[in-house]
Amino acid sequence: MSEVITDSGDSFTRSAGRQLLLLGLLGVAGFALLMLVLGWLSGLTGSSSGSADAVDAATGTITLSLSGEPPQLDSTRMTDQVSGHVMGHIMEGLLRYDAQNRLVPGVAERWEITPEDAIFHLRDNARWSDGSAVTAADFVFSWRRTVTPSTASEYAFIMFPIKNAEAISNGKLHPDQLGVRAVDPRTLEVTFERPVSYFDKLMAFSTYLPIREAFFNSRNGRYGADAEDLLYNGPFTMTRWVHGAHIRFEKNELYWDKDRIRLNVIDMPYITSDSNAVLNLFKDGKIAVAGLDAETLDNALEQRWHLNRFNDGSVFFLEFNHRPERLTHNLNLRKALQLVTDPGELVFKVMKLPGNLPGESLFPVWLRGVDGPFRQEYPAPQHRVDFDAARRHLELAKQELGLAEMPALVMLTGDNPISNKQSEYFQNVFKKTLGIDVKIDKQIFKQRLAKMTSGQFDMVMAGWGPDFDDPLTFGDLFSSWNANNRGRYNNPELDRQVRIAQASLDPKTRMDAFAEIQRIIYEDAVILTHYERGVVYVRDPRLQGVVRRAVGTDPDYTNASIVDS
């Protein structure tokens, strides 16, 4: 189980074991310098102007910004982190994470899991925001809808541990044959397709949330589209959603654990990914938390604010489009691009934000292996920059593709300062070293997701954060059946290793499979790994108890409180 990442202390490394791993990754001098910088940053003091706009103890209100507009809030179809953050405050599944990042009872007050099945016993005081009881049938309806082909859920694959889920998703069986049933209103029975070592960890993930069927049907296809098109069972309800402009949560008085919730209102009247705008809002006392990038970090240092940081567990990469009609389907072209990229240069010379680690693997350094960190037990393939070898691969690619010159490649990216800097860096690297032109396609968040899904790119700046606390949350990302595999990479051997990791209960067998997946992804240049994300941010000191974590809702304000300054 991962340790919690809170905003109250030094959480850049998770354990002594992880510090040793970072020491190996960076070298003694590099690690010492990094720790020196981070230690200096955390010692700074100061805060925003202290305006009551951001933190209002009298009304129990905090004001925040949101990085983007949630595309929609139907848990059976959502895929993005913004929507997940919102849903983590207004909905609750069978299990949840507490302030120490432990799996604890949610709607389910107790459960039993065997290699064959699981039984969840629902609490009798779990309520929807209209006063009706949350029942086992609500989970059955939601889970069946997720795997129904017409739903087109990109997360249907995460249901595949349940009996018949994959066959239903492929149109071979009717959704009624999913291995889940309501024994009675308070008892949910789940039958497994195969033994599952991590099923309890899935129960806190948003795709496994309940939906009340009668309410869903009453929305006439608009479920999750607006605040009034949702029924809530979490700590807060959404009372305002002005698209692209304003979201507001208010304490849910019908939530079974309402006495734990100390905030009355979480107001987000600013939706922007502009880091300078966010920092100015914090500086003016209008929001209680602001994330920093390399540009705004200098400004924060000048203000002598206390800086918080942690590693959020995410890995960022350049994903190739492997569809046959795309040039990037060619392995030699991908290898050429791989051999001219230097994650260390990107992290230390371009991004220049403390906490980011150069990317070496799809599997980040914090994941556990058999007895210790996975990457200690199974080191990532050694990456090297080799311009001459890259040019040889490029010539082979041209021959195989029947091209005298390589046409321009399209790089899909977000429309924000961080994405702009990174995409322009790679545009320059590929042109300078290989003579390949890159057209940058900048899109707002929602449109970028749509273009990724439809395959309108040769390369896309992408990333992946963990859905649950197990290496499989990264290991199955490029399996052929995973709809989040936006480039449609298809490798039967990788699929076979994923199946082994899914079905085995033996830790060594599973970790051996993940090691093979790690090797295949590098040798086949499925992606170009860039960095593991470190986050640096400032917070109003009156706001306490905010939990930052790699797995689960992040940031989590459900345990937050307001204290006197």
Image (spheres, helix red, strand yellow):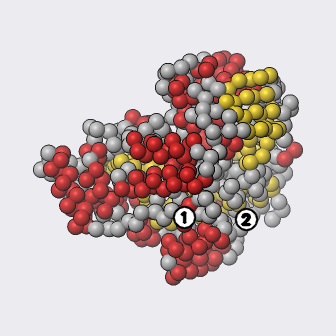
Q: Residue furthest left?
A: 404
Residue at image position (73%, 65%) is: 8
Whether residue 100 sits left or right of residue 125 in the image: it is: left
Q: Check disc 1 and give the amino acid type.
A: Glu
User: Which mark, by number, is residue 278?
Assistant: none
User: Which mark, by number, is residue 377?
Assistant: 1
Q: Position of residue 239 (x, y in %)?
A: 71, 35
- The quadrant of the rendering that contains the C terminus is bottom right
Residue at image position (37%, 38%) is: 455
Whether residue 274 sits left or right of residue 65 in the image: it is: left
Q: Position of residue 336 (x, y in %)?
A: 27, 58
Find residue 128 and report its image quarter: top right
Q: Nearer the viewer, mark 1 or mark 2?
A: 1
**Mark 1 and mark 2 residues within 8 Å of each other at the beta carbon:** no
Residue at image position (56%, 51%) is: 510
- The quadrant of the rendering that contains the N terminus is bottom right
The answer, for residue 327, to whether it is visible in the render is: yes
Q: Position of residue 330 (x, y in %)?
A: 26, 47
- Marks 1 and 2 sit apart, C-alpha to C-alpha, by 31 Å
Residue at image position (26%, 52%) is: 333
Q: Residues within 10 Å of mark 1 (few under 14, many from 20)?
A: some
Q: Position of residue 134 (x, y in %)?
A: 78, 28
Considering only order in the chain, which callout, 2 or 1, is on the residue closer to the N terminus?
2
Q: Residue furthest bottom?
A: 29
Residue under numbered circle 2: 8
- Please, what secondary structure does the residue beneath circle 2 have? loop
